[in-house]
Image: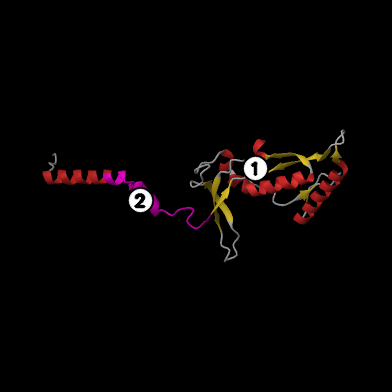
Amino acid sequence: MTAQMTRRQFFKVTAGGVASVGLGALGLSPEQVQAATRPFKLERTTEARNICPYCSVSCGVLMYSIGDKAKNVKAEIIHIEGDPDNPVNRGTLCPKGAGLLDMIHSPNRLKYPEVREAGTSEWKRISWDEAITRIATHMRADRDANFQAKNADGVTVNRWQSAGFLASSAASNEAGYLTNKVLRGLGMTAIDTQARI
């Protein structure tokens, strides 16, 4: 037994199909509507913009953390993605940038200064003040021992060639300028940046 479709039913079915196709073309597909009703995993997070620390390209990243300072709950980064509003990467990330979350949560990540004293194989944690003081002391001793005021021809050169400096390419222009001025003022000639490594 076959059912006959009346002219009125045919127009209803046709109008429904045209409406469905029209709404789908406007971006209102049923899947998207259903996705909007499901709980979003980043719903309770705080979004922050940052720059990827790996190379000199300076791709923008969006970092999502969960936690509440008002309730004394330590914030923890749970998701990182490319920033679509950043003109450099427009939301894309290279494999290193895509692995930022793993780097942040790695148990091997260095979070504070450490030193290995001469003759030992163990690293010990030191304070930032102690680390900066030790670095400055070593730099001063090396510069005093190896600073060259004049070359063999008696020409003033004021250079310190026994040390070098590798600057961050993810730093701002201002930080790079100040770093270069300080190091050149000390007489250091071996200055490079991570962008060339």
Which residue appears at 86% of the width and 45% of the height?
144
The front one of 102 and 173 is: 173
The location of residue 52, given as percent across then percent down, is: 59, 45
The amino acid type found where label 2 is placed reads Val
The magenta segment is: 22-47
On the image, numbered disc 1 is attached to which residue? 169
* Label 1 element class: loop
- Few, some or many C-alpha atoms within 10 Å of disc 1 (few <14, some 14-19, many ≥20)? some
On the image, numbered disc 2 is attached to which residue? 33
The front one of 104 and 150 is: 150
The front one of 145 and 131 is: 145
Does 38 lie within the magenta span?
yes
- Color theme of the render: secondary structure
* Label 2 element class: helix
The location of residue 45, given as percent across then percent down, is: 51, 56
The front one of 102 and 128 is: 128
Which residue appears at 12% of the width and 46% of the height?
8
The Cα–Cα distance between marks 2 and 1, rounded to whole angstroms, is 43 Å
Task: Quadrant for the N terminus, please.
Answer: top left
Task: Quadrant for the C terminus, please.
Answer: top right
The location of residue 173, given as percent across then percent down, is: 63, 47
Q: Is residue 117 left or right of residue 93?
A: right
Residue 188 shows in the view: yes
The amino acid type found where label 1 is placed reads Ser
